[in-house]
Image: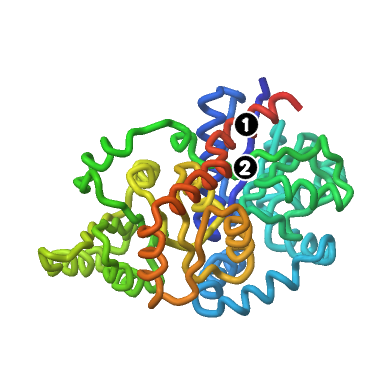
Amino acid sequence: MMNQLLILSASAGAGHTRAAQALEKAAREKKCAAEIRHEDALQYTLWWYRQIYSRGYLICIHHFPHLFGWLYRLTDPPWKYEMGRFLLDRIHAGALIRLIEQVQPDWVLSTHFLPPELVSQLKRKKRFRGRQAVIVTDMDVHGYWLCRNFDHYFVALEESRKYLEGLGIAPDQITVSGIPVDPVFAIPKDKQTLREKFGLEPNLPSILVSTGAHAVGPVEAMVHSLLSLKLPSQLIVICGHNQKLRNRLQNISAGLAQKSPVKLKAVGYTHEMDEYMTAADILVGKPGGLTAAEAMAKGLVFVMVNPVPGQEERNADHLLEAGAALRCHHLSSLGYKVGELLENPQRMAAMQVNAKKMARPDAAQEIIQKVLTI
């Protein structure tokens, strides 16, 4: 058993943190190390960089998505900005470098692309004597995930493995594990029991609308479009910490006519996302890596709304290729797209089967088990 395990994430978007928490939980269940430590790498950077990075990311993807997509493509070529990244990281992430040097863990597991290059340089200079694993938390491998000095890569898809092999990475240094999700997603639960628990109709098709922790974006427009459905169905909208949105949706729900075929339930922030996904048939939202992995783990058809250019669009491409998702380009047609799916139960059942084929709910456990045996 190893002595210390250091898991590094970054609070730029929630997915990287959720993946790290899944690994931490799996590691504690496995009791794989005497000390298991999870740190947010951004908290070890200069305050101005932290503010620009985290806030700039959110502003860019919500208000300037095409600019974000352009930057994503610009920085994607392998190794192109390797030295420049390291020099910038060394300036703003001195505290993170000192943490790694002082702790000297047996393994560093990174669920964000910020730490691997720093750890790689420390390994090259023999200032870090442990091992490094890079856990890619999207279906595609962007150039920023690449580093020279590592021990193992964990990726979501076989295609990603082939891409890394094409760059010269040895096959035995790559594992197709899937994206790590909370181990609770691997626990079978009964759909009807959970619908009863959440006060849902037991036999109505259930559409879960995922909006993120802060429920930003055109959520109400999505809901209004889905309320145009002609078939009896129920919407469950996760409003996160946005209480104002939840109040508005509850007012809309109260105002729905008795003869309306669509029921609406607004839910606040929840730690039971796996159970809401189990209770649902369809997920509507943006295809972030973790959200997509969770949806596949529960066999949900993913109806993707306006993926952000960059990693979300690439995730969307993979889900579409696998036949597990639909893409909606215009919110006004969202109700139509979902309605067409509900009216074709054979198609929906086939897509749910395809989703389950992509599912890797044990990814976190597999990753921890692998690092114990390397």
How far from the left and from the top, in percent, is residue 122? 80, 46
In the rendered image, the residue lying farthest to the top is: 1
Foreground: 271 or 339? 339
Choose top left, top right, bottom left or bottom right for residue 169: top right
Quadrant in the picture for the N terminus:
top right
Rendered residue at 55%/75% (across/down) = 60
Residue at x 64%, y 53% (from the top left corner): 139
Q: Quadrant of the C terminus?
A: top right
Instruction: Determine contact: label 2, label 1, CB under 8 Å.
Output: yes
Q: Which residue is mark 1?
A: 366
Secondary structure of the residue carrying numbered label 2: loop
In the displayed structure image, the side of residue 70 where residue 18 appears, left or right: left
Is 94 rendered above or below residue 339?
Answer: above
**Mark 1 or mark 2, which is nearer the start of the sequence?**
2
Task: Say which quarter of the image contains residue 6.
Answer: top right
- Alpha-carbon neighbours of circle 1 within 10 Å: few (<14), some, or many (≥20)? many
Label of residue 178 in the image: 2
How packed mark 2 is, by other alpha carbons closer than 10 Å (few <14, some 14-19, many 20 or more), is many
